Amino acid sequence: MVVKEDPGAGNLSTFLQFLFIATVGFCTVGKFGTAKRNIPFKQYLLLVGFFWTSSVANNYAFDFNISMPLHMIFRAGSLMANMAMGVWILKKRYSVLKYLAVFMISAGIAICTIQSSGDVKAPRETHEDAVEEEKLKFIDWLWWCVGIAILTFALFVSARMGIFQESLYSKHGKHPWEALFYTHLLPLVFWLPTSPNLINHVKIALDTPEMVLLGITLPRQVMWLILYVITQGLCISAVYVLTTECASLVVTLTVTLRKFVSLLFSIVYFKNPFTLGHWIGTLLVFIGTMIFTEMLQKCVGLFVPKSEKKKQ
C-alpha cells in the first residue's frame, strides 16, 4: 500500500523502520547508552554495511519499473545466493538433489523475470509519434534492466550477511536483540545525504487524503507508514532471533516461505497481473525449495508402507 501510494517511498519507509527499532532498542537493550556490548564494535560495522546496503538496494529497485510480485519472486532466489556463497566462502559441498533444487529455483526466477519484462511501463503522457514512443519503451526497458541488476546485487549481499551472522554468533555467542539494536542504530547516519529525498516523500505522505483507523484520523500514507513500521519491526525481530537458533540456510528457507505467502496475498488482494508463465516460474521456485529442504522426500515417505521402507 505504501508503494502504490508513492512508488519512491521505499527509502523513507526503511529509514522510519530503522529509526523506530533503534529508538526502542536504545531504551531496552542499550539501557539509554549504559549497557556494555557483547560483540565488538568493528564486527557490527561490517554487519551494518551488509544490512544497510541490502535494504536500501531492495527499496530503490522499485524506482526502476520493478513490480511488487517480481520483487518478491526475485528475492526468493536468496536460497540460491546463500548456497553459492556457502560453496565459495565456506567451501561447502551439496548433494545432486540440492544442486537440482537450486537449478529449479534459478529457472523459476528467470521465467518470472522474462514474463514481467514484457509489461514494463512507466507513468507518462501518451505520444502520437510512434518512433518517439518506441524510444521511450526502450528507455523503460533499460531502466528495468538496472532494477534487475540492483535486485541481483542485493540478493548476494543479503546472502553474505547471513553467513557472516552465523560465524559471528558462533564466535561471540547468541545476542539477537543487541545485534538488532546496533544494526539499526549505526546506519542512521547514512541517511543524512538522502535527507532532501526523505523530506520530499514526507511532504507527499502528508498531502495524501485523510483516513480513519481505530478512531484516529491521519493522512492515508502516514497511516500506511505507521502500520508498515510496526509490522516490519515484528518481522525483522523474529528473523534476528531465528538467526541465533538456526543455520543461515534454514533462516533463508523460512524467509522464502514467508515471501511465498506475501506473494499470494499481493496477487489476490491487490489484483496484480499473474500469467501462466508466472505460475510455472513460481511452482519451480517452491518445488525446488521443498526438494532442497527434503520436505518433498519426507512427504513421499509418508505414503510408502513400512514394509516397503524395510525392503529399501
Image: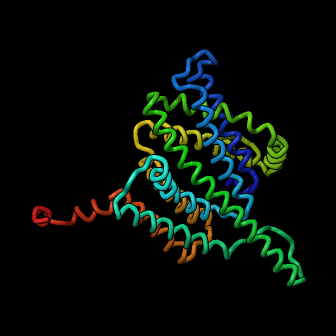
Name the residue nearer the viewer: 81 or 265.
81
Lateral position of residue 163 relative to residue 58, left or right: left
Tell me which residue sits at (64%, 40%) in the image: 49
Q: Residue 112, image x and y in percent? A: 57, 70
Question: In the displayed structure, does residue 305 sit left or right of residue 168?
Answer: left
Q: Can residue 149 be seen in this view?
A: yes
Residue name at image x 27 percent, y 59 percent: 298
- Nearer-the-camera pick, 227 or 292: 292
| Residue sitting at the far bottom | 130
Task: Tell me how the rendering is colored.
Answer: rainbow
Instruction: In the rendered view, tell whether residue 195 sits above or below residue 34.
Output: below
- Picture layout, residue 15 above or below residue 131: above
The image quadrant of residue 20 is: top right
Vertical relation: 14 (above or below) 131: above
Residue at 68%, 47% in the rendered image = 56
Place of residue 188 in the rendered image (x, y in percent of width and height, measured from the top left)? 71, 34
In percent of width and height, residue 104 lies at 45, 68
Position of the N terminus by quadrant: bottom right
Where residue 172 appears, as percent x and y from the top left, is 46, 28
Task: Say which of 10 and 1 sits in front.
Answer: 10
